[in-house]
Amino acid sequence: MTSPTTLHAASREALAESERTLDEVLGQAGAKPDAVGAELFSVVELLTREIGLRRAVGDGSSDPQSRKGLVSSLLGGKVSAPALRVLDTVAGQRWSSPRELLDGLESLGRTALLTSAEKAGTLDTVEDELFRIARIVVGESELEQALSDQTAPAEAKRKLVRDLFGGKVGAVSLALVEQVVVRQTGRGVGFGLDRLVKLAAERRLRSVAYVTSASALSAQQEEQLADKLHGIYGRPIALHVEVDPRLGGGLVVRVGDEVIDGSAAGRLAALRRQLA
């Protein structure tokens, strides 16, 4: 499982454009992120098996419209309209290599499934389930070896995952784990599972705003703040509000690694730094 940060420049741009389409698709009424994620994963498996098709779709030197036409002719009517729209964007981009196109598709599938959990309010549960599975696998060397065996049939490994964890974790967690096991790299399944845990944690943190206020906020003020943050980040943001009179006034908002300091204390500290 390759991180988007390890993609070459062209592929990073292609993935960013494809992510924009995915966000638009998943934001539409009636869209089912879990279904879209499962369909994208199925296309990853198809392209993994069909080397010639993978090369044709991932050939950045060929005509983009031809690549789009190929994907449409093969998958039209076999996947949902939302998934096909995402695949159309993917096929129209210039990827650094067919392998990186596969990595990008896999990343989009994971994003769709995590979005599904986010919308259902179960992202924290998914993160916990992935963490527990990762610890079980890493703690049992024979199990990790069996799941990491690249010569073993994909269906056999998928069955093992379902026998071990089916009914014990949710559908989103199970689908994510299966994908890691089926398409694991030389670094092993344990590494891939830990990456999943990190992705879920990062997404959950990006969707929570930790707000420190000099005084208590009314329900209306919290709603207005949530709406503004939604506009800034393009997704619903849950607020965790704490009161700290030492701020002297205003707010400090942290979303992931970003900090918006609108407090009196923050402005005073900034002024002191400038004077220094």
Image (cartoon, rainbow, N blue to C red):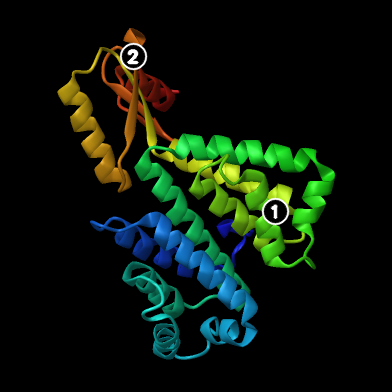
Residue at x 35%, y 65% (from the top left corner): 21
Residue behind mark 1: 160
x and y percentages locating residue 71 in the rendered image: 44, 83
Disc nearest the viewer among 1 and 2: 1
Residue 70 located left or right of residue 130: left
Amino acid bearing label 1: Leu
- Quadrant hosting residue 154: bottom right
Question: Which residue is labeled 2 in the image?
Answer: 247
Q: Is residue 25 visible?
A: yes
Query: Badge 2: how crowded within 10 Å, few (<14), some, or many (20+)?
Result: some
> Amino acid under label 2?
Leu
Give the position of the C terminus as an image quadrant: top left
Q: In what element is the residue under mark 2?
A: helix
Q: Is residue 103 left or right of residue 253?
A: right
Q: Residue at x 25, y 58 (%)?
A: 28
Q: Residue 275: where, in percent of width, then height?
A: 40, 23
Image location of residue 203, percent across then percent down:
46, 43
SS class, disc 1: helix
Instruction: Decide: is 170 above or below 153.
Output: above
Relative height, residue 22 to residue 91 (above, below)? above
Q: How far across and down, in percent of the image, does residue 233 sit?
A: 32, 45
Residue at screen point 26% across, 20% down: 250
Q: Mark 2 or mark 1, which is nearer the start of the sequence?
A: 1
